Amino acid sequence: MPVLRRLLAAKITRAARLADLHALRDDLQLKHLLAMLAAELGYASWDACKADIDACPAAAIDRYRLDAGAFNDFEKNWFANEHDALDWQRAHGGYIVRYGAQALAILKRDSA
């Protein structure tokens, strides 16, 4: 229901009421959700939003990749701030992902 409310608020579908949108939920497609995300971020379309995202360095979206599970096969070491994570990285290696005020160092797990 929260996603349906967001779709309704973004005026992505023709449904005027939550009950109407709920009845049509099986017809929703990825394009509807991408249009909703674009609208929530202030873009007129997903294509415009994606163009800006694609122009960003990959590290700019690491936080979202982390939330999506992209680093699940990696060891994650959390730190209260980026400075502490960078200090740890100098000694141990890894890749730093910024997450709000926090940061984490990501290491590839041994496959043994």
Image (spheres, helix red, strand yellow):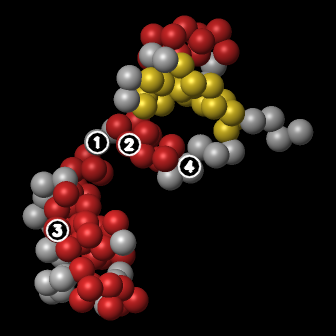
Q: Position of residue 95 (x, y in %)?
A: 55, 27
Q: Which dot marks residue 10?
A: 3
Mark 1 and mark 2 in contact (Cβ < 8 Å)?
A: yes
Q: Where's residue 20, x and y in %?
A: 24, 89
Q: Which mark is residue 56?
A: 1
Q: Please name which of the two marks, 2 or 3, marks the residue nearer to the observer.
A: 3
Disc with the residue nearer the chain's start (3 vs 4): 3
Q: Amino acid at mark 3?
A: Ala
In this picture, residue 73 sits left or right of residue 50 = right
Q: Residue at x 36, y 72 (%)?
A: 1
Where is residue 21? Give x, y as percent.
26, 84
**As rendered, which of 88 and 37 lies closer to the eye?**
37
Rounded to the nearest angstrom, the CA distance separating label 1 from label 4 is 18 Å
Q: Amino acid at mark 4?
A: Ala
Inspect this view and state whether residue 48 appears: no
Q: Nearer the viewer, mark 1 or mark 4?
A: 4
- Residue extending furthest toward the front: 19
Question: Residue 2 occupies which quadrant of the picture?
Answer: bottom left
* x 65%, y 9%: residue: 91
Q: Which residue is mark 4?
A: 70
Taking depth in this image into account, of 62 and 54 the one nearest to the observer is 62
Residue that mark 2 sits on: 61
Q: Gap between marks 2 and 3, in whole Å?
A: 23 Å
Which residue sits at x=62%, y=25%? 77
| Helix, strand or loop under label 1 | loop
Residue type at the position of mark 1: Cys
Q: Secondary structure at mark 2?
A: helix
Question: Which mark is first along the chain, 4 or 2?
Answer: 2
